[in-house]
Image (spheres, rainbow, N blue to C red):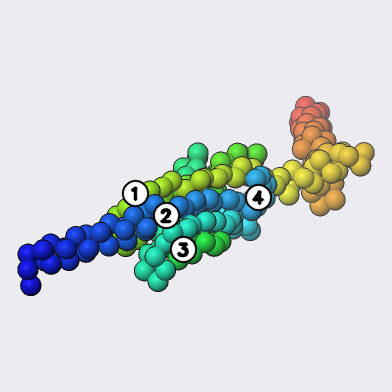
Amino acid sequence: MGKRAITFIILVIMLLSLTFSSTNTSALTATVVVKFDLDDLEYTYGRNDSNILIVSGNITCVVDGLIEGYQYIKVELFAGENNGWGPAVSPSVTRFYESGIQGFNASILIPAHADNRTDVRLGVSGSWYVEPHGEKVPDSTGTVYSDRINITIIRPEPPFIKEMYEGGSHGSEPYFNWLGFPNVLVTVVLPLFCVVLISYFAIRRMKRKTNK
C-alpha cells in the first residue's frame, strides 16, 4: 500500500471523527427546572404532629441531542432554608435518558421551640451534567432553574388558654373552675373567710381568759 493510500485513509478517518463529534456536540441542548407543587403553605404543628415537614414537587428535563442508549443527563439537587432547620431533598441525584418529568420531596425538621407564625423559605436548586464523563462536549453542564416555597408554622393554643377565652366569650368569668367553684372564690373569698374565723376565735379566747 502506497503512502498516498495511507494518507488518504488517515484523512478519511479524521474527517469522519470530526463529523461525528460535530454532529453530537452542536445539537445538544438541555433545560432542567424544579417546581414545588405549592407556592405557599401553612403547617399546623401541635404536640401530636410530626416535626418533619415534607413538601413535594417535580423536576422537568427537556433535552435534545443525547446519544441514545449511551448518554444521559445527571441532575444533582440541593436544599436550602433560612432558619437552619435541617433542609434535605430526595432524591438528591436524578437521571434523565430522555426528556421527561420526575418527582422530588424536600423536607425540614421543625424544632419544638418554634414560635407561632414562624416563616420558613425552603428552596431547591442544583446542577446538571451530561454523562458519561468521556463525552465532554460544549454545553454539557448547566444550572437547574430553582424554586422555593414559603411555609408558615402555626402553633395551636394550649387547651387551658383556649378554654379560658371560650369561657369569656360566653359571658362567664374567664377563670378556671376547681371542684365546680370559680377560681376567685377559692383564691380570695375562702382565705379571707378563714382569716376572719381564726381572728374571731382568737379574740373570744382572749376574752375568756380576761374574765377569769
Is residue 145 in sight in this rendering? yes
Question: Sequence order check: which comes first, mark 1 or mark 3?
Answer: 3
Crowd around label 2: few <14 · some 14–19 · many ≥20 (10 Å): some
Residue in the picture at 11% in, 63% down: 4
Query: How packed is label 1: few (under 14 Cα within 10 Å), some, or many (20 or more)?
Result: few
Expressed as whole percent of the image width and height from the top left, the position of residue 43 reads 66, 49
Front position in the image: 64 or 99: 64
* N-term-proximal mark, 3 vs 4: 4
* Number of marks drawn: 4
Q: CA distance from mark 4 to mark 2?
A: 32 Å
Which kind of residue does numbered mark 1 sit on? Pro
Question: Which residue is tagged 3?
Answer: 96
68 shown above or below 168? below
Disc 2: which residue: 28
Q: Earlier in the sequence, mark 1 or mark 2?
A: 2
- Farthest residue in the top direction? 210
Q: Amino acid at mark 3?
A: Phe
